[in-house]
Amino acid sequence: MTQHANSANLPNYLIKENGGIYVELSLFPVGGGFEEYVDKLFNAGSRFRHVDYKLLMGLLYDYDSVLDAQGMKARVKLAEDIAAFSPLRKPLYKNVKIDAQGLFAEYFFEPVEISVIIEEPVYGEPDEDGVAPIISKTRKESVRPGKLDIDEFIADMWMKGVRFGIDIEAVSDVISRREAARMNIAVQLDPTEGTDAEIVEASEALRRDNSPKIMPNGKADLRKFQNRFPQIDLGERLLQKKPRVLGKPGYKVTGVLIEPEVPKDLDISALAGPGTRVERQEGFEYIVALRDGFLSLDIETNHISVTEKIENKGGVSIKTTGDLQLSGNEFIEHGEVQEGRGVEGKNMTFHADVYGNIVSQGGFILFESNLSGGSAKSIGGDVTANGRTFNSTVEAWDGHISIIYAESCMIFGDSIEIDRAVNCEIIGSDIEIQNAEGCSIAGKRVRVNSSTSCRGKDNMVSLLIPNLSATDAQIQQVILMLLECKKNIASKEANLSQIKSDPDVSRYLTLVTSVKQGLVKLNAVQENNFYQMAAKFTKVTSVVTKLEDERQELLKKVHAFKQELTYLIEVRNKQGANIHCVIPEVVGDTQVRTMSSPTGTSLFQKMKPADIKATLREQGQPKERIFHDDSGSVDWHYAMPEIEIPQD
């Protein structure tokens, strides 16, 4: 029979119930104590019965894996019971050979025998009936084949120094076969190497991609590269730090801990350059962008930065960049922009010749060299050309255009300054040209210091004057309504005067006013007379009240019409203000005329280039001509037609 050890003094995390010994993981002493309990248990001559050796090793040496598998609130079965380890069986287990470094433990298995004490009776002389009585008993010792027990083996090896890594399946197999065998019953568990901390890319935008850009319809746009200049959005993650992962410790067969080598760590903040910072997101450290801009990698400082501008030296062509659509704040190009190539961005500077098409969204465009056969369009910004501008279109309808030399160009802006313009179409609100030769010019305020023809083409200037017909019609309509209101007011006032001409009515109305204003106090008798008088003049009072109300409404309308009239006059005056043309020196064929435009320069914004050229070359009616000669000067100021406004 199996002897049972006392299991009443179990620690609080070991519970005996339902035919087993269970471990309450929520109470388990993570800081230590279980190993001491096991050691004390085995040395006290007890052992576990049907122990879960894998769980035992996990509790002793790898508690985290037990928690991962079971959960903190689990209750897991460790063994069926705690039993005594009989002293008579301990001699069955031989010594174990442990490697000097604890790498392995070797054991020699062989069949075992167990001594058994048998009591046999001693018979005396038979009696009369021939039956021999038992007069005593003798004890004889005999040897029988025995069998080792795996639970006893675990406890015995523990006490002999093998506390980790027993191959339970192999040992159990040898024990069951009862054969002689020499084998390693336990081997050392080597520590698991950890992983060094590393930096990985957190954005696909960090690398240039010169493959064709894929359009929303799935087709490839061979004019644009996928990502030539990495452009970064505010808040975009750039780099991620993968933290180091500590290795798992190993154990010698004696249970001695083998510490793994500590992985290398790194400081990601050392990589963060201007325009970036380190943030912790979702449990990881990232370098994120603090602004929209371009990615910059400085090999010398080993910094990653996001800058508002980027400089490119390779030019813009189908081989180098393809068409560019930039989201950063500033772009500087030192190379040539190939014919047909497009660059769209914000503030852009070009130091070499440009033959392509440039579009700025709300920023400036600066050409330090030539613009030839291309175009420049700044939406809400300015364009400056310090080189030669030839056969190109320059647009800045809401901005300022400054050009040193322009030839055969179309130039549209709010304000325009040109040193020399030859054979150009120029439209703007304010235009100042030092020398104009054979150009077509339209604007509200135009100054040409020197004007002449070019290759048989007159220098033609059109002054954009307002078409006042719509505004004048509105003014006349308001005037008519104002006069009508005043006429109705006069009629109401005449009716009121006629009613009040009756002395009795006049006295009653005066009394009513005095009573309402508290100027007259009535006693009881006077108050009774007053009510009788009011009954007499009820109809008259009603008519007077109605006329007064109608008069007040008409006075309000008069006030509103006057305000509207004032506004329309201001609009009219603004339409015709500061329209003039000054040409101090005419040295060749020059024409100056007026051109009616209800919307100023907006008249031309939706026109096709051919229509613009034709419109600017129209001779106009004789009454529209201001100047036509090949010499002299012009100093003309627009005089707006008078409009008759009635006085109060």
Image: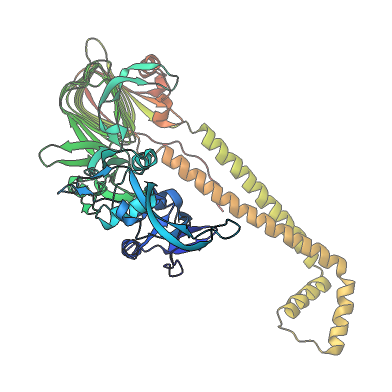
* Residue toward you, 119 or 78: 119
Quadrant in which residue 18 is drawn: bottom right
Would residue 92 be found to the left or right of residue 574 on screen? left
Residue 132 position, x and y percent, is 54, 58
Q: Residue at x 15, y 48 (%)?
A: 101
Would residue 32 be found to the left or right of residue 645 on screen? left
The number of numbered badges drawn on the structure is 0
Q: Residue at x 59, y 60 (%)?
A: 128
Question: Quick check: can you spot residue 479?
Answer: yes
Residue 626 position, x and y percent, is 34, 25
Quadrant in which residue 49 is drawn: bottom left
Question: Quick check: can you spot residue 584?
Answer: no
Q: How is the image coloured?
A: rainbow
Residue at the extreme top:
456
Residue 320 position, x and y percent, is 21, 20
Vertical position of residue 335 compared to residue 237: above or below: above
* Residue toward you, 35 or 5: 5
Vertical position of residue 489 compared to residue 135: above or below: above
Residue at the extreme left:
300
Residue 339 position, x and y percent, is 24, 15
Q: Check the picture and name the quadrant holding the C terminus.
A: bottom right
* Residue toward you, 2 or 558: 2
Quadrant in which residue 635 is drawn: top left
Vertical position of residue 188 compared to residue 362: above or below: below
Residue at the extreme front:
128
